[in-house]
Image (cartoon, rainbow, N blue to C red):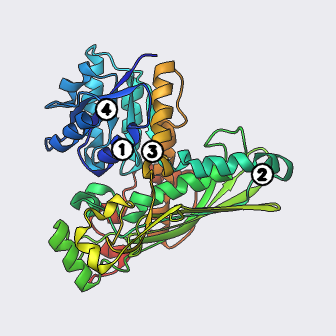
Amino acid sequence: MKTLRYGIVGGGFVSAFHLRALRQVRHVEVAGLFSRTRPEHLARRVRDEGLGEGVIYNSIREMIPHVDVVAIFAPNFARVAHVEELCDAVRSGVPLRGVICEKPLARNLAEARRMVELVESVGLPHVFFENQLHMNSVQAGLRQLRPVIEAMGPPVLTRSGEEHAGPHSGWFWDPVRQGGGVMSDMGCHCLAVGWYALTPPNKPVDFLEPVSISADLSLLKWGQPNWRQQLLKTHGVDYAKTPAEDFATGVTTFRNPETGQLVKSQFTVSWMFDKIGLRLGLDGIGPGYAFDMNTLRSPLEVFIGDAAASGAANTELALEKSQASRGLLTVQPNEPDVLGYTDENEDAVQAFLAGRRAMLDWNYGLKIVRLTMAAYLSSERRAVVDLTDQATNQFLETYVPKIQQGHGAEVLGEVR
């Protein structure tokens, strides 16, 4: 089988994490890299780990003739411009087999529609990366329950959560460049996986129809003076001027179009989890059954005492967003696999090589952006947002949350 050549756009944390996943994926190599800052460290890793040549290019247009697929792992604020450049190259006759975009597809619905319109205007196959739907624990749980679901009916309630202590990069803390706070960053994951876990077997990922959403967004930790100063010093972001939410919770209601039954998905996300590291959770309840997943359960634990702590290196060797290098540490031996990154890359590679659709495309990513925007709108209005209302849906098309505009104090309260 032919090898697919990836061209990666973006030189930050998520690109490095995908490289860890690609070590386990067949028929793919990393042929090109482009980033606003020259990604020498990624290029070395690509070559050292035998993932490909990892040639650094000065632009996306320069890279495209040397790759088969472009994977956009760049910051949210740069994505529309990257896709415009990519599509201009395809229009001029440069061949490309497809494009991948890491979540979220865009900062708001207008940008998301622009992204989809661009790739479809040149007939370019597109894959959306939402890793949590590909997690083995999610897939295995639903597969194990399938006979029960078919006999008793699909789940009626899911509860999803994602928490860690905060992003790696300054732009990710900036609500204008990122698109908001933790709701934009991690709420999109929970909206997607909760929706998916409610979906009956053999139905499309968007089979259930969103009916309404209610959300509450708050700034609880990172608006406090000492933490705000730390954020300003470390990342150059001032939450006294442009605050974003560090906590979000809510409920989305869906309707089964065949039976009319209403089901619900609850979500909670935060940037305040000063504990072991990144925690993902998903549980669900159906008629006579239930399931529960927590990524902090691991077959491996390591203890590092104070006397040995000086020998500890990178805290994230154990777990993404780990907050300590000593004490009792939960270690995931293969974190990219646990979190679904390996399987989403495998799905994309096989889809492009076989000329078929992948599990998720950008139209699905657009629908997740729509739900995310509705969550921001619900919090701003302090009311349930009716997703069946035509006027509301029209408003969402051009809606930009106040937090994303840099006016978060209007909805989160003044930071003192």
Residue at the right extreme?
151
Percent coordinates x, y for residue 127 in the rendering? 45, 34
Judging from the image, what secondary structure is the residue with disc 3 in?
helix
Q: Marks 4 and 3: CB-CB under 8 Å? A: no
Q: Marks 3 and 1: CB-CB under 8 Å? A: yes
For marks 3 and 1, give the CA distance: 9 Å
**Closer to the N terminus: mark 3 or mark 1?**
1
Q: Find disc 1 in the rendering and name its residue.
A: 20
Q: Find disc 3 in the rendering and name its residue.
A: 341
**Closer to the N terminus: mark 1 or mark 4?**
1
Residue depth check, mark 1 versus mark 2: number of the one nearer the observer:
1
Q: Find disc 2 in the rendering and name its residue.
A: 260
Seen from the viewer's position, the closer of residues 129 and 54 is 54
Judging from the image, what secondary structure is the residue with disc 4 in?
loop
For marks 4 and 2, give the CA distance: 49 Å
Judging from the image, what secondary structure is the residue with disc 2 in?
loop
- Amino acid type at image mark 3: Tyr
Seen from the viewer's position, the closer of residues 65 and 52 is 52
Q: Find disc 4 in the rendering and name its residue.
A: 51
Residue drawn at point x = 13 percent, y = 31 percent: 58
**Closer to the N terminus: mark 4 or mark 2?**
4
Seen from the viewer's position, the closer of residues 239 and 160 is 160
The answer to whether 54 is drawn above or below residue 191 in the figure is above
For marks 4 and 3, give the CA distance: 16 Å
Residue drawn at point x = 30 percent, y = 46 percent: 16
Q: Is residue 215 left or right of residue 80?
A: right
Residue 209 appearing in the image:
no
Q: Crowding at label 1, few (<14), some or many (≥20) Cα neighbours within 10 Å? A: many
